[in-house]
Amino acid sequence: MSLIAVFPGTFDPIHYGHIDIVRRGSILFDQVIVAVYDRPQKNILFSEEERLQMVQKTFEKDENVTVTKYQGLTIDFCKSVDANFIIRGLRVFSDFEHEFRMALANRRMNPNIDTVSLITSEKHTFLSSTTVREIAMLGGDVSSMVPNFVQDALKKQFTD
């Protein structure tokens, strides 16, 4: 039996904190599916296709990482790809409460799918997509937070 995990998110944009969690998860699982949520209920900067392309480019050389988009409940997507695990990253203590409630709700809906939470690397604790977007919007340097092609995409968004 293959251990398959899903790492869901909007990735608007993907940043080094996300990348760290996926790559660490890829050591624990046979396959990690990075699932780009198609219609988040929050304001997003990049289109679904732009977000998907950036995430695909990020992991194009990672052999056991695949990237796809999805819609609907994460738990239903997991079932559709035969994943028994959801990977979540925890940055700060306030993340725990939200992720704990979400893990319990997912477990209630499907007790065969477990949530595995990975504590972010210390150097990424401040990172969030919102932070990256705000810094980039104000002309700040995000080169230590995102890959070069994401930085270029951010610059293009805010200079056009």
Image (cartoon, rainbow, N blue to C red):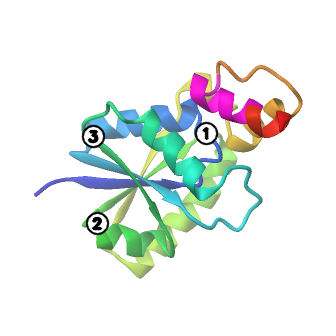
Disc 1 and disc 3: Cα gap in Å? 19 Å
Q: Secondary structure at mark 1?
A: loop
Magenta-colored span: 145-155
Which residue is at 39% across, 70% downward?
77
Residues 150 and 121: in front is: 150
For the residues labelled 2 and 3, the Cα–Cα distance comes to: 18 Å
Whole-angstrom CA distance, mark 2 to mark 1, is 27 Å
Q: Tag 3's secondary structure?
A: helix
- Please state which amino acid type lies under the numbered disc 1: Arg
Q: Amino acid at mark 3?
A: Leu
The C terminus lies in quadrant = top right
Residue that numbered label 2 is attached to? 81
Can residue 134 be seen by looking at this rendering? no
Q: Please indicate whether residue 27 sits to the left or right of residue 157 in the image.
A: left
Q: Position of residue 52 (x, y in %)?
A: 51, 50
Disc number for residue 91: 1
Closer-to-camera residue (39/125)? 39
Report the mark closest to the observer, 2 or 3: 2
Q: Is residue 160 above or below residue 74?
A: above
Question: Residue shown at 21%/45% (left/top)?
Answer: 30
Q: For mark 3, what is the residue?
A: 28
In front of the other: 70 or 83? 70
Q: Could you tell me which secondary element the residue under label 2 belongs to?
A: loop
Instruction: Say if the magenta span includes residue 117.
Output: no
Q: Earlier in the sequence, mark 1 or mark 3?
A: 3
Amino acid type at image mark 2: Val
